[in-house]
Image: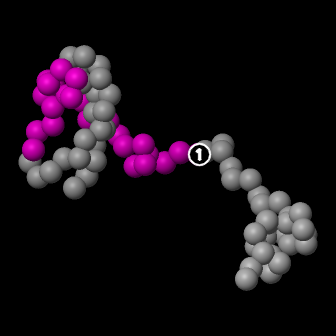
Amino acid sequence: MPIYEYVCAQCSHRFEVLVRGHAVPRCPSCDSESLDRQLSVFAVGSRSTVSAAAPQPCGTCGDPRGAGACSLNQS
């Protein structure tokens, strides 16, 4: 069951809805069936400028995997 994103043509409300079978979605704001289906965010490729920060070495032993990864913290 796909999740689709919609914009209501009457009130411009943006929302997403789980579509089951042949069900016709309705705007949760104004109950209109006049909807424009949008491309899903995860279905469209993008080049993100956000990158995950590399872990910092453990302050206790210097393990490069980061705090909590060293054998000093394991029982």
Tell me the residue at 80%/81% (across/down).
71
Residue 13 vs 48, above or below: the answer is above
Quadrant of residue 47 in the image?
A: top right
Say if the magenta span includes residue 49: no
Q: Which residue is mark 1?
A: 47
Question: Looking at the image, which is closer to me, 31 or 70?
Answer: 70
* Element marked by disc 1: loop
Tell me the residue at 68%/50% (across/down).
51
Total number of numbered labels?
1
Question: Looking at the image, which is closer to me, 38 or 5?
Answer: 5
Residue 14 vs 19, above or below: the answer is above
Image x and y of residue 63, in percent: 86, 72
Image x and y of residue 43, in percent: 40, 49
User: What kind of secondary structure does the magenta stretch mostly adopt?
Assistant: loop
Q: Is residue 43 left or right of residue 20?
A: right
Which segment did they paint magenta?
Answer: 23-47
Residue furthest to the front in view is 75
> The N terminus is located in which quarter?
bottom left
Residue 5 vs 19, above or below: the answer is above
Tell me the residue at 30%/38% (across/down).
16
Q: Amino acid at mark 1?
A: Arg
Tell me the residue at 66%/45% (across/down).
50
